[in-house]
Image: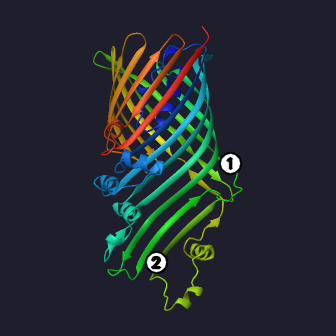
Amino acid sequence: MRRRALFFLAFILSTIVKAQWNDALVQVPSQKDFTAGIYGNADFSSTCITTLFAANFLEGNYISNSLKKQVSNNLQKFDRFDAELNYGVYGVWHCDTIGQRVFNFFFALRHKSYINSTFSPDVFNLALYGNAMYAGKTAYLMPFSLNMLSYQQAQVGLVCTNFNGKAELGIGLSFLAAHQLLTIDERTGQLYTDPTGQYIQLSSDAESYRSDTSGNAAYINGYGASIDIYFRAPYKLGNRMGTISVSVNDLGFLYWNNKSLYYKKDTSYYYDGVSINSISDLQNVSFNGASKDSLQNKYLSFQRKSFFYTIPSTLSINSNTDFGKYHLELGYNSIFNANDIGYIYAQGDKFLANGWMTALQVGYGGYTSLNMSIMFSKQSHNSTFRIVLNHLPGLLLPGYFGGAGLYLEYIYSFGK
């Protein structure tokens, strides 16, 4: 029973860190009276943006045509990318009895940052090459969706380890502190460029939410709450035992204060430049900040208001079958409100001597196409350390695939 003490918390951590990572990547050692852990995760993945392109972009290096070409070769009808930075600490008190039920109580403090998007090939081409290639053509800017979000989470919860016999049931309740938000949703967007470059015409139906951007903006710009629910039950496949798990994580919202910004507009915009007939006309043409502000007020007029925002939540379903020193896991993860598509995977776990364990996962979906992850874990008497490398294709072939991820965790158990 103690062997399952951190299962629910480990499951939450792994699915929150990345939808492609699952609970079997975090094997739970034999637990003591109290367990504390610390973890951190950085992850990037994309269907088209290569790891090499992303690295050069983040470092501020020159983006050569060859780097752009690598991305262009990967463009599909709809493309996606995602980047995350998550870290936190947690603790668990084990095996407290209430009536005939055995419970494990836990708490966690976490920071979560996300940026994800779905976009058309034309959006990438316009951003990297400009609109010259679209002379006499229409560039389609939809669908385009961008989410940037960061917040902090304080969570408490419990797991009943003998619910209805051998099943497990868990729940976690969280208080959220909102930090930053930017969302853009382009429902309709088309850009036409005149064949001779005399004018451009843009039609757009867009909506955007943004947290306070003023110079004196507070670190905490709102608050919210979320809930996690988890259920696991055993099954038997021939003479092999296994478990099936279902969970919903981060089902909740954030309320952003009245200094937040909101934009919504369905409009068409025609621009044919500035006419200059003589040098004397230059004194009447303004390219300073006032001109910029007037254009922004006319076409990108934000209003300040408070609003509710639904945070990304994860649905996870997986089965884990015991083959002795080997485990086979099959699963499905989907992140809602995050430009994600469902992710399916198969994973094999191998338990080695001297407390070592390794796991290899192969999957498809999420924010990339083909994904591979590998995990190494070392368990000693009172502690466990694990490292996960995610998106191996992007790490091994950075000029062809998009993705790179690293997850680190250290757990220490106190008591007998």
**Element class at badge 1:** loop
Colouring rule applied to residues: rainbow
For marks 2 and 1, give the CA distance: 36 Å
- Residue 62 seen in render: yes
Q: Which residue is mark 1?
A: 219
At which x and y percent is residue 191? Answer: 39, 73
Image quadrant occupied by the C terminus:
top right
Q: Could you say which quadrant of the image residue 241 lies in?
A: top left
At which x and y percent is residue 123? Answer: 39, 62
Q: Which residue is mark 2?
A: 268
Give, as a three-letter code, the residue at label 2: Ser
Give, as a three-letter code, the residue at label 1: Tyr
Answer above or below: position of 283 versus 298.
Answer: below
First in sequence: mark 2 or mark 1? 1
At which x and y percent is residue 282? Answer: 55, 86
**Discs 2/1, front:** 1
